[in-house]
């Protein structure tokens, strides 16, 4: 995922959305951007600051998380960070603090950071990463520029994938009777419209991957599924039936 960074960087961001990995990756890029001494757009990716930040070894980048045996970031950790922020950078122009996950800070820890977030030294930058920003105090949130990441596509649920594989196999190889029987059985399970849409979407993906082996039949199945989707034929409870697929598929044959 390539997210554009703002042209001029704020001193504090609250990074939300995406996944834990994408939030951490963005924080790393932002840390490099704060420290980069390359020409042109930052981070350049090649100067020594960028390389050290990417490798996670820049002395001016601090990542704060819960201690290994705890789930919370406590007030002592927040106070240590706060004092550290008033010590000038080691080798970069800035000092970057990544709090990941920031929503693991207990309220006392959050309160301890308020002042440094509000008016810490000009070189200090703060990146707060949170899956649940609602757990942060309003006073913390309001001191950070929001940086929401787009939601990530959920990986395909293995059960759905298996069901789609069976349906794809049936549609690609079954005779008219078997297809009608299989679709009727599926309909009798009374899937919700969103479940059915997910199943048929994944079935289309699988059929598309098997087109080389079943070119003519595969193309017919895809046309039938697409026509059903576009005509909103799948509307469980509204009198439409999955049998329509069988009809569309074999009428055409
Ligand atoms: Zn650089």
Image (cartoon, helix red, strand yellow):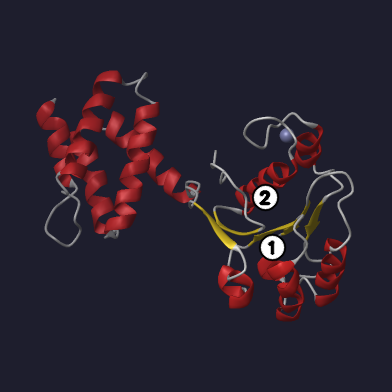
Residue at x-position 87% and y-position 47%: 59
Name the element at disc 2: helix
In the depicted structure, whether residue 240 falls above or below residue 136:
above
Name the element at disc 1: loop
The disc placed on residue 6 is none
Residue at x-position 62% and y-position 63%: 130
In the depicted structure, whether residue 135 falls above or below residue 95:
below
Q: Position of residue 15 (x, y in %)?
A: 60, 57
Instruction: Choose between 166 and 86: the one closer to the eye.
Output: 86
Residue at x-position 12% and y-position 38%: 247
Image depth: mark 2 or mark 1 in front: 2
Q: Position of residue 223 (x, y in %)?
A: 20, 31
Instruction: State left or right for residue 74 relative to residue 5.
Output: right
Instruction: Choose between 105 and 35: the one closer to the eye.
Output: 35
Mark 2 Cβ inside 8 Å of ligand 1: no
2 or 1: tag closer to the N-terminus: 2
Find disc 2 in the rendering and name its residue. 27
In the depicted structure, whether residue 13 falls above or below residue 47:
below
Q: Position of residue 177 (x, y in %)?
A: 19, 38
Q: Is residue 27 among the parts visible in the rendering? A: yes
Characterize the local packing of mark 1: few (<14), some (14-19) or many (20 or more) Cα atoms within 10 angstroms. Answer: many
Inter-mark Cα distance, 2 to 1: 11 Å
Q: Quadrant of residue 64?
A: bottom right
Find disc 1 in the rendering and name its residue. 101
């Amino acid at each position: 995922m390539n997210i554009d960074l703002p042209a001029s960087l704020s001193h504090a961001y609250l990074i939300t959305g995406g996944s834990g990995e994408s939030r951490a990756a963005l924080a790393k890029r932002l840390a490099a951007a704060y420290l980069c001494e390359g020409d042109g757009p930052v981070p350049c990716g090649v100067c020594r600051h960028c390389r050290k930040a990417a490798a996670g070894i820049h002395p001016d980048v601090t990542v704060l998380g819960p201690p290994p045996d705890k789930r919370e970031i406590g007030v002592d950790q927040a106070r240590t960070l706060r004092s550290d922020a008033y010590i000038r950078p080691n080798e970069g122009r800035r000092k970057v603090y990544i709090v990941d996950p920031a929503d693991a800070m207990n309220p006392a820890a959050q309160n301890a950071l308020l002042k440094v977030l509000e008016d810490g030294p000009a070189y200090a930058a703060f990146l707060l990463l949170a899956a649940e920003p609602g757990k942060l105090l309003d006073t913390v949130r309001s001191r950070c520029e929001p940086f929401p990441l787009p939601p990530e596509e959920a990986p395909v649920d293995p059960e759905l994938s298996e069901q789609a594989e069976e349906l794809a196999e049936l549609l690609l190889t079954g005779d008219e009777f078997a297809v009608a029987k299989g679709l009727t059985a599926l309909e009798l399970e009374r899937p919700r419209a969103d479940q059915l849409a997910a199943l048929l979407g994944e079935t289309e993906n699988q059929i598309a991957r098997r087109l080389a082996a079943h070119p003519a039949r595969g193309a017919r199945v895809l046309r039938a599924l697409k026509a059903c989707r576009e005509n909103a034929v799948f509307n469980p409870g509204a009198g439409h039936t999955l049998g329509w697929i069988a009809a569309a598929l074999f009428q055409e044959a």
